[in-house]
């Protein structure tokens, strides 16, 4: 199940309303991405974070330095 580990956002049920006003059931699913996050104590953990939390800066994304070092060589 797609659930954000920061804000707790999860799928919600709703209705799709067509132009003729017919109502059919549907799901609204959060856009959850698996990212590596650096926690306050410095540890790195892979978490499922929704794109709203990533964009607002609620978590600090981990960028490895080994990629930049290998590009210089």
Image: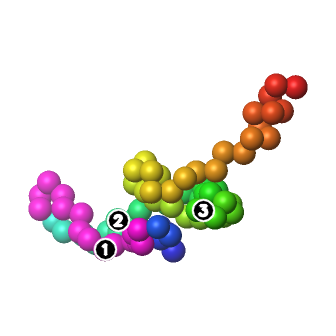
Whole-angstrom CA distance, mark 2 to mark 1, is 6 Å
Mark 3 or 1, which is nearer the eye? 3
Q: Which of the 4 quarters of the picture holds residue 41? A: bottom right
Q: Position of residue 70 (x, y in %)?
A: 83, 33
Which residue extends farthest left?
21
| Mark 2, residue position | 28
Residue 39's tag is 3
In magenta segment, residue 39: no
| Mark 1, residue position | 13
Whole-angstrom CA distance, mark 2 to mark 3, is 29 Å
Asked whether disc 2 touches disc 3, contact meaning CB atoms under 8 Å apart, the reply is no
Q: Position of residue 29 (x, y in %)?
A: 40, 65
Asked whether disc 2 touches disc 1, contact meaning CB atoms under 8 Å apart, the reply is yes
Magenta-colored span: 7-21
Mark 2 or 3, which is nearer the eye? 3
As rendered, which of 27 and 3 lies closer to the eye?
3
Give the total number of marks visible in the rendering: 3
């Amino acid at each position: 199940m797609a659930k954000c580990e920061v804000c707790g956002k999860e799928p919600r049920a709703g209705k799709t309303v067509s132009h003729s006003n017919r109502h059919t059931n549907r799901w609204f699913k959060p856009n959850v991405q698996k990212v590596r996050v650096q926690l306050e104590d410095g540890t790195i953990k892979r978490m499922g974070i929704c794109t709203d939390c990533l964009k607002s800066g609620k978590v600090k994304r981990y960028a490895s330095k080994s990629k930049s070092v290998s590009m210089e060589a």
